[in-house]
Image (tube, grey):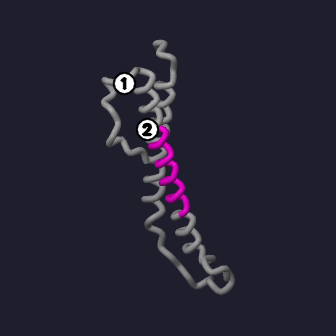
Amino acid sequence: MLNLAGTPPLAAMAETDSRRLIAADLRALIMRIESSMRLIDAAMMEADTLETGFAYGDPAGSADIFVLDDVTPRYATASAALSACRAGLGHALQCLSESGNPA
């Protein structure tokens, strides 16, 4: 993540410099969101593996294992929220990168 503690105020920067700084910050946020989404996907896959009983590579011996999956809906909801955030940040980045022509 970017450390903005030493960043000069945007009012004192040239417009192109401030746009570049904002764009870099948006890209960092998008990367962080994508990282979180990958973690959620991995956790959902792990929960699914445990639910199907194939966690230890012995599907035949695992037939008597049942796991009640109450976390997948929460993971799915969190993933959907992050996806919406990612889309919004992508749109903000696109708007920022436009040449300033009114839409």
Residue 58 image point, x, y percent: 67, 82
Residue situated in front as seen by the camera: 79 or 12: 12
**Residues packed near mark 1 inside 10 Å, few (<14), some (14 to 19) or many (20 plus):** few
Mark 1 or mark 2, which is nearer to you? 1
Kind of residue sitting beneath label 1: Met
How far from the left and from the top, in percent, is residue 87?
49, 38
Q: Quadrant of residue 10?
A: top left
Q: Which residue bears the numbered disc 1?
A: 13
Between 9 and 43, which is closer to the camera in this rendering? 9
Residue position marked by numbered label 2 in the rendering: 25
> Is 98 displayed left or right of 22 in the figure?
right
Magenta stretch in the rendered image: 25-42
Is 45 located above or below residue 37 in the figure? below
Does 23 sit above or below residue 74? above
Query: Residue at left 51%, top 25%?
Result: 97
Which residue is most to the top? 102
Tell me the element at label 1.
loop
Residue drawn where x is 46% and y is 25% of the image = 96
